[in-house]
Image (cartoon, grey):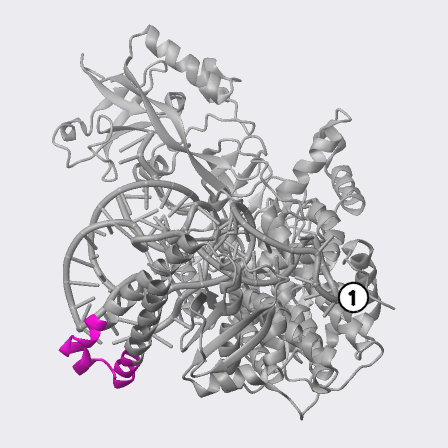
Amino acid sequence: MKLPKHYDPSGVEDRLYQFWEGGGFFDAEVDNTVEKRFSMVIPPPNITSALHIGNALQYTLHDVIIRYKRMDGYNACWFPGMDHAGIATQNVVEKKIREENLTRHDLGRDEFIRRVWKWKDKYGGHIKRQMKALGTSPDWRRERFTLDAGLSRAVREVFVQLYEEGKIYRGERMINWCPRCQTALSDIEVEHALEEGRLYTILYPLKDSTESIAIATTRPETMLGDTAVAVNPDDQRHAHLIGETAILPLVGRGLPIVAAAEIDPEFGTGILKVTPAHDPVDYEIGSRYDLPAINILNDDGTLNGNAGPYEGLPVAEARARVVEDLQATESIISVQNYPHSIGHCQRCNTPVEPRLSRQWFVSMAELAAPAIEAVRSDEVEFIPGRWKKLYFDWMENIKDWCISRQLWWGHQIPVWYCQDCGEMIVSREPPSRCSKCGSDNLRQDTDVLDTWFSSALFPFTVMGWPEQTPELDYFYPTSLLITGFDIIFFWVARMIMMGIRFLGKVPFRQVYFTPLLEDEKGMKMSSSRGNIIDPLQVKETHGMDALRFTLAQSSCKGRGMRVSMRDIDASRNFLNKVWNMARFVLLKLGDERPGSPKRGLNLDDRFILSRLAWTIEEIRDNLDSYNFNIASERLYSFIWHDFCDWYLELAKVRLSSGQDRAVKGILYYVLKEILKLLHPFVPFISEEIWQFLGEEPVSISIANFPSVGERDIAAEEEMEDFKQVVRAVRMIRSALRVPEQSMVTVLMRTERQGLSRLVEEKYEALCALTGAGSVRVGRDLSVPPDSARQVLSEAELFIPLSGLIDVAAERARLQRACNRVEVDLLKVKNNLENPAFIERAPAAVVAKERDKQEELTGKKERLEANLASLGG
RNA sequence: GGGCGAGUAGCUCAGCUGGAAGAGCAUCCGGCUUACAUCCGGAAGGUCACAGGUUCAAGUCCUGUCUCGCCCACCA
């Protein structure tokens, strides 16, 4: 059986995935006899998700690491799962039933939830199939869903415990309300964006006076909820107003004028209208002075009965009408354009309304303290470390977390209210009767919990908590979390807090934050911008390995990484190279499967083994430190430039002369090592080739990851010399347009023993790799006067030219080379003529500088002589 | 208003603890050389954003400045 000429991923990938899954190669068992253990939990994708390039990146990096660890002898487990994604999923299903002209209210809660589950079974979890297409290797048997029975039980357990210790409470607070989703949101679910708005300055008359005060606002309609006016007590212009009463235009309500230090006298007129029910600052002031809070909004964002004649209008319309009416009474003295920041719902981008509302909250400060310490002490290590600062800034000023959502899809809050006596019962399981009055007329709180509440528990609930499972003993804390920095507050911080609180241990030892994906112009990739790369399409055209390799190779430590189709083309080309390299080796091997030779190694062998050793070391180091880009670059350049460009080309010569026995063994050995190194990055193609080899183990996914060998620096340096000779001959031939067919004699004059010996030893290879017909080496060669000359570090090459060369071009080239050398020489001279340098620089550096000077001087002389010989 | 990150070849980026500017793509020239034209060989291309400073020595360390990107913040 021979490898086909081109690697065709389609067909291969799916077949291999089935082979892996069927063979249980990704499964991990608790095994206390194995000390080396490694675990990760997936950032659970939403059930509504389709695989986009962003999660393709994250899952690829997960998979590189987990496969590497698995091969490296770790009992490595990757726990998969999915998130019920409260708002997102509910929105999708609501949209769907809208096609039947139904709202969720038409269906009722139970029926609606039944529909969502139905939807989940039918359409949800595409992403799981897509993760398989990507080649990811979690232990699928351990998959959990945040809303399944076990995790729901854990959620109730956590809720009740936090409630019992007073960390969860219910209260009326200023929250963010999305009028479209009709639910409360937490502060971090609000995204601020600068929008063009207007600043209106409105006159409020003073009671018992003919005077008015001017107040600036961007939201005139909220005046309907005004219950006071405030000024800064230190503001000389306005302090005298404190204690007086202003009259609210259009409404006529009297507003006490109070003092508030938070008012910036520089802004607007320095006077603030106070609307306690619809602004966080106003709420503060309101509660200080015990002012009434008048809510003017319905849940859907229209104005309510408190707005009098404006009742029923949406906010925007109400604003226009209020402005109109104010203008009619000439109460508006100025309107100016004023761009300002407006909060929007993260899910539906509707402007949110700050609003006073009765909700459930988690008190965070106490939970945060040990979580801050855990990161400060590197018990949880952040990589890159700069994200620590962001974490600390947020955690040290953490606000209470609004966890109740007025949705139906989610974990319903485990609180019941007695309809008879009003008692509130917080319980893990539904109570049958009221603990106070014994009534069975109980009703559960209708709200559900923020989706992130259950996500925060995922690292331990995925292992079966609150049961004391062997998995928790063995795999918790997990070793590593890989995620995006955009969910550092939503998820990472909360997991750390909950892990410490409920398990007494941090949930993970390290967090690697991936960069965010950008297109080739540096724009954030998003479907709305239309600049995304669709992984499934790439699978069709290039294969998933090409995508995986590109993503790993682009994953730098910056904030963003740019990826374009060109990069994926380049990866595809690389994999084609790998394929053909394997094809070549197998072609030469036939049915042989030689062992790796220990004796009879020549320079080429020693060179490639040494480069391999270095490459393995680099890959291990860089994977261990999550420098995926460097690891992939090292692998790429070893395979392509060390192995294919040099070792294989040299091997051809040796194989054709039929003299070398070691070469086949080395070819085969290095091929296998390369496949193993490749496997974490490009599992499909490496497995496919491995299967052709018929090697043990049956899957490369459980082969041993290569271990670091000894380097042979001398061999690498000697080979470097040889490469330089080859390159010099090629260059001079190319520059002078010596046709490929015409055999030339290269004369090499060198003082250096090593070089001439090398040329003699590798004479055949030198001719083969350069197209030279013959090479003569010696100190005193007689060089024909019309020779073209190439200067090597310690030698000169001549090609006798009987025919024509482009003298002018060659002279220009030499002149440029000469200039470059002169610049370098000048720098060296400056150093050496500087007494301070001689005195203070380390001796080794000074010696090196002297060597450099000698070398450059020689080079310069030769170049000049050469130039002269061209008649320059 | 604070904070973070980036500015190195036409493009995307390496360059770790300071000691002769690197790679890949793109470009140009030459090649179907017994695995690969998704390839091979060669070349060209850089005041390392700017200005100071520390040092014998600065993409590399320090201080400013500019440009871009992204977070956070209750100036209504």
Q: Is residue A43 visible?
A: no
Q: Which residue lies most toward the top here?
A: A328
> Does the magenta run of residues contain A535?
no
Q: Position of residue B39 (x, y in %)?
A: 65, 59
Q: Is residue A563 left or right of residue A6?
A: left
Q: Is residue A517 left or right of residue A48?
A: left
Q: Residues within 10 Å of mark 1 (few under 14, many from 20)?
A: many
| Residue under the point 49% across and 73% down | A724
Q: Is residue A585 visible?
A: yes
Element assignment for label 1: helix
What amino acid is at disc 1? Glu
Mark 1 belongs to chain: A
The magenta segment: A829-850
Q: Nearer the viewer, residue A7 or A9?
A: A7
> Does the magenta run of residues contain A830?
yes
Q: Position of residue A781 (x, y in %)?
A: 45, 80
| Residue under the point 25% across and 72% down | A828
On-image quarter of the C terminus of chain A: bottom left
Q: Position of residue A584 (x, y in %)?
A: 75, 69
Q: Which residue is mark 1?
A: A688
Q: Is residue A627 left or right of residue A656?
A: left
On-image quarter of the N terminus of chain A: bottom right
Q: Nearer the viewer, residue B61 or A572?
A: A572
Q: Position of residue A520 (x, y in %)?
A: 52, 44
Q: Which of the 4 image quarters holds residue A816?
A: bottom left
Note whether A174 is above or below B6 in the view shown: above
Magenta portion: prevailing SS class: helix
Q: Which of the 4 image quarters holds residue A260?
A: top left
Q: Is residue B62 left or right of residue A410?
A: left
